[in-house]
Amino acid sequence: MSSSKIIGTGTYIPSIRKQNKDFLNENFLNEDGSKFNSENDVIIEKFRAITGIEERRYAEPEQNSSDLAFLAGEKAIEDANINQEDLDYIIVAHNFGDIKSGTIQSDSVPSIAARVKYQLGIENPNCVAYDILFGCPGWIEATIQAQAFIKAGMAKKCLVIGVETLSRVVDKHDRDSMIFSDGAGACVLEETKETSVGILSHATQTFAKEEAYYLYYGNSFNVNEDKSTRYIKMLGRKIYEFALVHVPAAMKLALDKSGVEIDEVKKIFIHQANEKMDEAIIKRFFRLFKKKVPKDVMPLSIAKLGNSSVATVPTLLDLVLKGEIENQEVNKGDVVIFASVGAGMNINAIVYRF
């Protein structure tokens, strides 16, 4: 029985840095279009205290999601030290496709994965390129799909990328716009006969009864804006409460499937959505095993990079593996968990041994 392991990782972190102070002159409004009672400096400080975000990165105007995905994928291929012509699949997770700066139209034809393959210059027609839409958990789900192809004997090497340019779909009148950012992260998965390493287990769930529209596309909070233009919107409180209940349970389900004991888990790479929410999720997860949260178990990148949706987990992984995050490292034999929650509402988790 074959499994799959990560043999290379890569990221592309955009160069434009937008700090919290850069929002001081924004005209933030309530959903009904009314003004906040608080001044922007108070709003921004409360935002920082809750989310942990101090700054975020935006793509250059001439860059699109497919460009960021290509740059991250190229680095992952180089890190894996493989011939890109040997790739069997390129799977790209995103939510909005290419949105050119200054426009409102999303472009996903051809697929982002096909564009990445084109930019990589891959000639092999048997390298299949396709996209996946799965909200913020998209990169993890694409990794699960790549594992399925490998275990089924349909692939030996897969490039999996998570990318987003959320700065192109935020409503500047919505204070939640401060959360979102741009970026790309990638990994190369390869077949392995060592069943004790690589992906050990996974769990995926979709809650779409009451929860389907907790994240959605909606109009600007400024009633004078064009009603045909829509932006990313979220029911923050509902998402927070949902995540605290369901994400720890899904992580436990994945860990139980793996047969690995909770004490063996060295790191949890969780979607960088909200620092306080992530801390609460991890605390509840360990509480399910009647354990305290180990020191440094949860690497964080959200303070400087914000929430780049599907890109947060692969970007965080690459930064840790490359020694870019202080007091964080992964060693051979370490068990880690990848976990995410997002639009759908979707949740997933992977238990992985390096």
Image: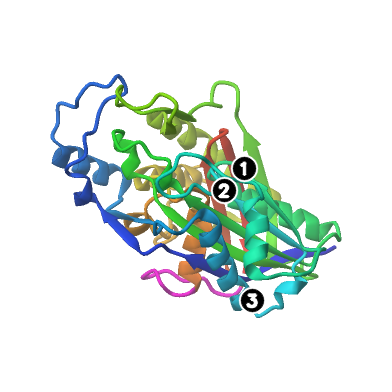
Query: Disc 2 on helix, strand or loop?
Result: loop
On screen, residue 80 versus residue 176, left or right, reads right
Q: Mark 1 or mark 3, which has the lower sequence index?
A: 3
Identify the secondary structure beneath mark 1: loop
The residue labelled by disc 3 is: 80
Q: How many marks?
A: 3
Specify the amino acid type for callout 2: His
Q: Earlier in the sequence, mark 2 or mark 1?
A: 2
> Where the N terminus falls, by quadrant?
bottom right
Region in magenta: 322-332
Please give the name of the residue rendered at 54% of the width and 26% of the height, measured from the top-left corner. 211
Q: Alpha-carbon neighbours of circle 1 within 10 Å: few (<14), some, or many (≥20)?
A: some
Q: Is residue 42 left or right of residue 189?
A: left
Instruction: Give the image quarter of residue 169.
Output: top left
Q: Are marks 2 and 1 in contact (CB under 8 Å)?
A: yes
What amino acid type is highlighted by mark number 3? Ala
Report, in whole angstroms, how far the alpha carbon at label 1 lies from the one at label 3.
26 Å
Quarter of the view holding residue 69: bottom right
Q: Is residue 304 left or right of residue 5?
A: left
Place of residue 6 in the rendered image (x, y in percent of width and height, measured from the top left): 65, 68
Q: Nearer the viewer, mark 3 or mark 2?
A: 2
Residue annotated with mark 1: 133
In the rendered image, the vertical position of residue 259 relative to residue 7, given as above or below = above
